[in-house]
Amino acid sequence: MESVRTCVGCRTRAPRSTLLRVVAVDSALIPDERASLPGRGAWVHDTRECVDAALRRRAFVRALRVSGPLDTQTLEKRLNGYGHEVNGSK
């Protein structure tokens, strides 16, 4: 049986394989393609609507338990189709 997670954007439950894990590294949101980076992670659907909703509601800040603003540039690039990096690959 596959694990179920809740999307921080739309708040619906979905299988882990359909969601994107996001972690905070030095106040920057980093997509964790393999879901293997250390630290707390937040799960979100890989859609513009869910990510925008999570940013608007400050859900990433709460889910990742960080203080202050987060740099969303890397996550925005991922959603726009640029840099499909996989955990530090070049």
Image (spheres, helix red, strand yellow):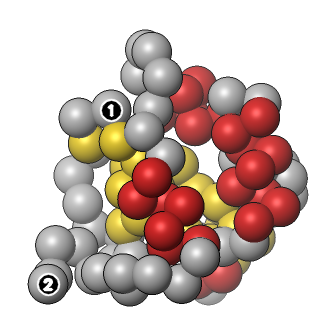
Q: What percent of the width, then of the height, locates residue 52?
A: 75, 50
Q: Nearer the viewer, residue 41 or 52?
A: 52
Q: Say if 26 sits above or below 12 in the image.
A: above
In the image: residue 11, left or right of residue 17: right
* Residue highlighted by disc 2: 90
Q: Is residue 21 visible?
A: no
Residue at (58%, 25%) from the top-left corner? Answer: 62
Q: What percent of the width, then of the height, locates residue 65?
A: 45, 24
Q: What percent of the width, then of the height, locates residue 40?
A: 37, 42
Other-residue count near label 2 (Cα within 10 Å), few / some / many at <14 / 14–19 / ≥20: few
Query: Which amino acid type is shown beneath numbered disc 1?
Result: Ser
- Rounded to the nearest whole Å, what is the CA distance between mark 2 and mark 1? 21 Å
Marker disc for residue 72: none
Residue at (78%, 58%) from the top-left corner? Answer: 50
Residue at (41%, 22%) from the top-left corner? Answer: 66
Counting the numbered discs, the total is 2
* Residue highlighted by disc 1: 27
Q: Say if 14 sits above or below 84 in the image.
A: above
Q: Nearer the viewer, residue 42 or 3?
A: 42
Residue at (83%, 61%) from the top-left corner? Answer: 49
Q: Secondary structure at mark 1?
A: loop
In the image: residue 7, left or right of residue 61: right
Asked if the residue at tag 1 contacts the one at tag 2, i.e. Cβ–Cβ closer than 8 Å, the answer is no
Point out the tag, 2 or 1, that comes first from the N-terminus: 1
Other-residue count near label 1 (Cα within 10 Å), few / some / many at <14 / 14–19 / ≥20: some
Q: What percent of the width, then of the height, locates residue 35?
A: 37, 70
